[in-house]
């Protein structure tokens, strides 16, 4: 193993309020300079649905596609619902869909990532936060009974950490 990354949001590729662009993290860019084959010699998670917990860039792009560069008149009454639709897609994916903690990452063949950075990690979290800790916290807090309005996935820190730390779960 030529490169392994432990860290926080900077190391993870956190941007636009989401773990979204791990392909642009400094360690992934460094891996490319070391001629490491992406997702072979240097594996990192890709985040479907724009990332977790909530990708502001996805919201802005959706608003731009729907309303253009200028929201007018009565369109303002539908803006919150449009935003909620984007947030709800991510919530559904990470809480009940293919991105939920019980589902293995991708096709289930990845045993580990070379980039195990998680936004919010501090030095102690590198050895204290484990997949079992993540599961215990998520089980103890439970999930909301239904979709919350303008509410992203519950426990985003632990949902991110469990996928990064144990992709084959």
Image: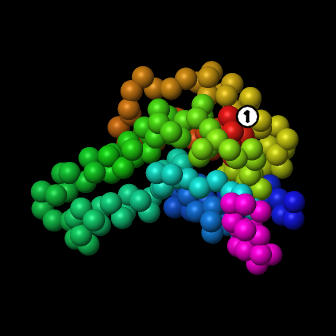
- Whether residue 161 is visible, yes or no, is no
Which residue is found at the position 33% from the left and 45% from the top? 84
Which quarter of the image is occupied by the C terminus? Answer: top right
- At numbered mark 1, what does the secondary structure look like: helix, strand or loop? helix
- Looking at the rendering, the stretch of residues picked out in magenta corresponds to 27-41
Examine the rendered structure and indicate whether residue 112 appears above or below residue 28: above
Which residue is found at the position 46% from the left and 40% from the top? 93
Which quarter of the image is occupied by the N terminus? Answer: bottom right
Residue 29 in the magenta stretch? The answer is yes
Which residue is found at the position 57% from the left and 41% from the top? 156
Question: What colouring does the structure picture have?
Answer: rainbow
The residue under label 1 is 131
In the image, farthest residue toward the bottom: 33
Tell me the crowding category of disc 1: few under 14, some 14 to 19, or many 20 or more residues within 10 angstroms, Cα based.
Answer: many
Examine the rendered structure and indicate whether residue 101 appears above or below residue 107: above
Say left or right for 124 vs 8.
right
Examine the rendered structure and indicate whether residue 118 appears above or below residue 95: below
Q: In terms of depth relative to the viewer, which is nearer, 167 or 26?
A: 167
Residue 149 in the magenta stretch? The answer is no
Q: In terms of depth relative to the viewer, which is nearer, 22 or 136?
A: 22
Q: On the image, which quarter does residue 88 sit in?
A: top left
Examine the rendered structure and indicate whether residue 138 appears above or below residue 55: above
Q: On the image, which quarter does residue 71 sit in?
A: bottom left
Looking at the picture, how far across and down is residue 39, in whole percent?
68, 60
- Whether residue 36 is visible, yes or no, is yes
Looking at the picture, how far across and down is residue 78, in whole percent?
20, 51
Which residue is found at the position 18% from the left and 51% from the top? 77
Say left or right for 150 vs 107.
left
Looking at the picture, how far across and down is residue 136, in whole percent?
69, 25
In the image, farthest residue toward the left: 74
Q: Count every numbered label the image shows and give the total.
A: 1
């Amino acid at each position: 193993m030529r490169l392994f990354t432990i860290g926080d949001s900077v190391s993870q590729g956190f941007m636009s309020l989401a773990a979204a662009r791990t392909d642009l993290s400094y360690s992934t860019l460094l891996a490319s300079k070391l001629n490491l084959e992406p997702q072979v010699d240097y594996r990192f998670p890709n985040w479907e649905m724009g990332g977790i917990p909530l990708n502001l860039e996805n919201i802005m792009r959706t608003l731009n596609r729907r309303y253009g560069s200028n929201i007018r008149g009565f369109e303002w009454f539908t803006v919150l619902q449009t935003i909620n639709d984007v947030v709800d897609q991510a919530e559904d994916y990470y809480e009940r869909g293919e991105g939920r903690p019980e589902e293995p990452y991708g096709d289930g063949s990845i045993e580990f990532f070379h980039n195990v950075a998680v936004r919010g990690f501090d030095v102690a979290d590198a050895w204290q936060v484990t997949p079992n800790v993540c599961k215990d916290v998520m089980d103890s807090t439970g999930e909301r009974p239904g979709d919350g309005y303008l509410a992203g996935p519950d426990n985003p820190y632990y949902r991110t950490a469990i996928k990064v730390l144990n992709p084959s779960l």
